[in-house]
Image: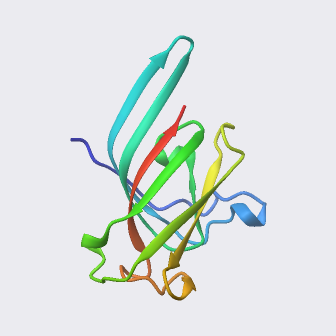
Amino acid sequence: MVQVVIRPRPSTYATTYWWQQATGTPEIHVHFIERNVFGNGIGIRVYGEIKIASGEIVYARELKLNCLQVLCLTPEYSRQATVQDYNAVKWIYHKSEFDNFASIDIYEATDGWEAAGNLPSDGSIWLDFVALGE
């Protein structure tokens, strides 16, 4: 297994649009990348873990993809030191376009949206992810 740890983004990486401004720096651990060739197209699956706070964004490039099409997120409760039920919700902007990004929000089952800093792992939460793209 090869693990790739993505370092914090440089401050010049964010663009001029307010919804693309990074609110923090997610920590991404890529465990496995699978590449499938179908005719003229190439499909890539990326498996790993991400430590992220609510309201942060993840670029396709940070997940080793050119474009992000599907992102499946599952909270990893064994690393949280809590028994609270969290739900991760994502919104993929410009799906299937080059160098797009996803916004990730964390909801707690009883209280609703969790602000950054209120989550159990240093104000963040660990999520297992499967990303599909090109």
Report the quarter where the C terminus lies. Answer: top right
Where residue 127 appears, as percent x and y from the top left, is 39, 63
Q: Is residue 30 above or below residue 8?
A: above
Determine the image quadrant of residue 27: bottom left
Query: Which residue is at a point 66% across and 37% down the rendered structure image?
Result: 96
What's the colour scheme?
Answer: rainbow
Where residue 6 appears, as percent x and y from the top left, is 41, 54
Q: Is residue 115 above or below residue 16?
A: below
Q: Is residue 130 left or right of residue 101?
A: left
Query: Which residue is at a point 32% across and 66% down the rendered structure image?
Result: 76
Q: Nearer the viewer, residue 6 or 37?
A: 37
Report the quarter where the N terminus lies. Answer: top left
Where residue 41 appears, as percent x and y from the top left, is 56, 18
Q: Residue furthest top?
A: 39
Query: Which residue is at a point 67% across and 43% down the rendered structure image?
Result: 95
Q: Residue furthest front?
A: 110
- The total number of labels drawn is 0
Query: Which residue is at a point 28% across and 47% down the rendered structure image?
Result: 3
Where residue 48 appears, as percent x and y from the top left, is 35, 51
Q: Is residue 102 left or right of residue 93?
A: left
Q: Is residue 54 above or below residue 110?
A: above
Q: Nearer the viewer, residue 109 or 49?
A: 109
Q: Is residue 47 above or below residue 108?
A: above
Q: Residue furthest left?
A: 1
